[in-house]
Amino acid sequence: MRYGIVAEYNPFHSGHKYQIEQIRKKDPRAFITVIMSGYFCQRGEPAILSARSRAEMALACGADLILQLPTYAALGSAEIFAETAVLSLAKTGICENLVFGSESDNLENLEKIAQLLIVKQSALWQYIEPLLKDGVSYAKAREQFVAQMLGTEIANLLTKPNQILAIEYLKAIRKHNLQIKPILIKREGANYLAQDLSNKDLTLPSALAIRKLLHNKKKAFFNLEEIKLLKKTMPNKALAILLRDWQNGSYVKESKLNSLCYLMLENTNQAKTRYLDQPLLNRLKKEIRFSNENYPAIDKLVEATTTRQYPKTRIKRALCNMLLNLKDREFEPLYLHVLGFNKDGRYLLKKMKENAKLPVISNFSELQTILEKSEFWQEELELRASRFWLELAEQPINQIFDSPLRIR
C-alpha cells in the first residue's frame, strides 16, 4: 500500500526512522511518500540543514519519495501547516494512508476533538474571543473550550505539540472529505521539547535536543563525546550526512541570523507581515532598546518578549515571516515539488504524474509556466526563502536550481 508522512526532519533522527520501520513492519511492500518543510520550519526558524540534505537523510533511511511543503504553509500555524500538507498528499493521487506520531495512542479521542472543532467552529470563536481580548493565548483558550465540551481528560490531549498536529491532520481529512486513512503510531522516547541529549535513559530523541547541541557548537568539527551523543540518537546514514554538511560549513550561522533579525527590527516601524502585529513589534523594539546586552541572541530576545498572549513559537514565526516579508494571503497548494526519490520512489513519481491533481515540478524555475500572474508571489517566496537560507549558510545561491536527488 501507499503511505504518506508529514515531516520536518530537522534533523532526521532515530524517532523518524522508528516511524518508517513501523510502517514497513506492518507492510513490507509499503511505498512511502514524505512531504517535508523546505528551508524554514513550523516552529519559526530556519532549518538546521538544507532541504536537499534532509531529504537525502530520509531517503537513506527508508523513505521513497520526498516532496517539499510550500514555505507559506511551513511558516504557518499548526492548522495551515497540517491542512496544506494533507491536501498536497491527497492531490498526489498516490496516498492511501496518512501516518503520524502522537504521545497518546487513543485515535478515537483525537478524532472526537477534530470533529468538535469542525462542527462547533462558530461556537468556538464565540467562546474564545473574550478570552483572547483578556490576553489568553489561542491555544489555551481552545483547550478550555474543548474541556468544557468533552471534559478535561480529552482536552489535555491539546497540551502536546504532536497531538495538536495529529488533530489538525484529522481535521483536514474530515473537512475536505479525503479518502485517506489515518494511522497513528505512538511516539516513544523523548518528549518533543526534551532538550538534553546526555540523558542515559534516552532511546528516541527529540529534534530540539539535537538542534540545541548543534546551536551550541563553535567549531566545524565534532569531538568524540559529541559524536557519541549524536550516534546514540541518529541513524548512521543520517549522521554521516550531518557531519559532512557541518564540516563543509553548510548549516545556518546563528550570528548572521541574529544580525539580520536586528537589522530588520530596527528598520521596521509598522507591522505589515504575518503574525507580527503592532503591539508585538513594539514589545520587541522596546526589549532591544532596554536590553543590557548589545544585540543579545534572538532566543534571549524571544524569551524576554514571551507572554501568555504571545507564546515563544508565535514570536519566532512572526520574526521569520518578517525576514521573508511574508504577508497574510489567500493560499492553497498549487503544485507538487519533488526533492528526491529512490528506485521505488521513481515508480511512485511515475504514478503521481499520471494521477496527480496538481502539476508536478522538479525545479522552482518551472513555476513560471504553471502559475497565473496573480500567483507569482508563491514562486517569489520560494526563491526568497531559498536564497535567504543559503546566505545564512554561506553557500552558493545556484543550489536553488539543483535537480531532485536520485538515490539508487
Image (tube, rainbow, N blue to C red):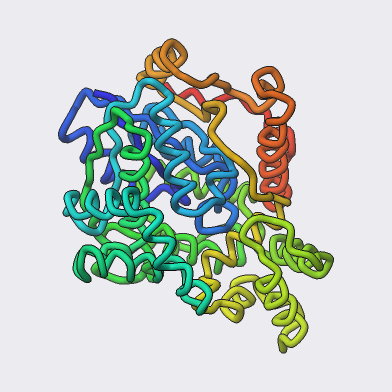
Position above or below: 122 against 368: below
Return the x and y of residue 18 as percentages of the image width and height. Answer: 26, 46
State whether residue 14 appears in this view: no
Q: Quadrant of the N terminus?
A: top left
- The part of the image, by quadrant, that contains residue 113 is bottom left
Q: How many marks?
A: 0
Query: Which one is nearer the viewer's eye here, 347 or 122?
Result: 122
Return the x and y of residue 324 as percentages of the image width and height. Answer: 70, 50
- The part of the image, by quadrant, that contains residue 376 is top right
Position above or below: 138 against 180: below
Query: Which one is nearer the viewer's eye here, 193 or 58?
Result: 193
Does residue 84 appear to the left or right of 3 in the view shown? right
Does residue 109 appear to the left or right of 60 in the view shown? left
Q: Residue at x 61, y 67 (%)?
A: 218
Q: Quadrant of the C terminus?
A: top left
Position above or below: 58 against 365: below
- Residue found at the very far right of the displayed protein: 267
State whether residue 206 appears in this view: yes
Q: Residue at x 55, y 40 (%)?
A: 51
Does residue 38 appear to the left or right of 112 in the view shown? right
Does residue 164 appear to the left or right of 263 in the view shown? left
Q: Residue at x 76, y 61 (%)?
A: 260
Return the x and y of residue 205 as percentages of the image width and height. Answer: 33, 59
Q: Residue at x 69, y 17 (%)?
A: 369
Return the x and y of residue 122 as percentages of the image width and height. Answer: 40, 55
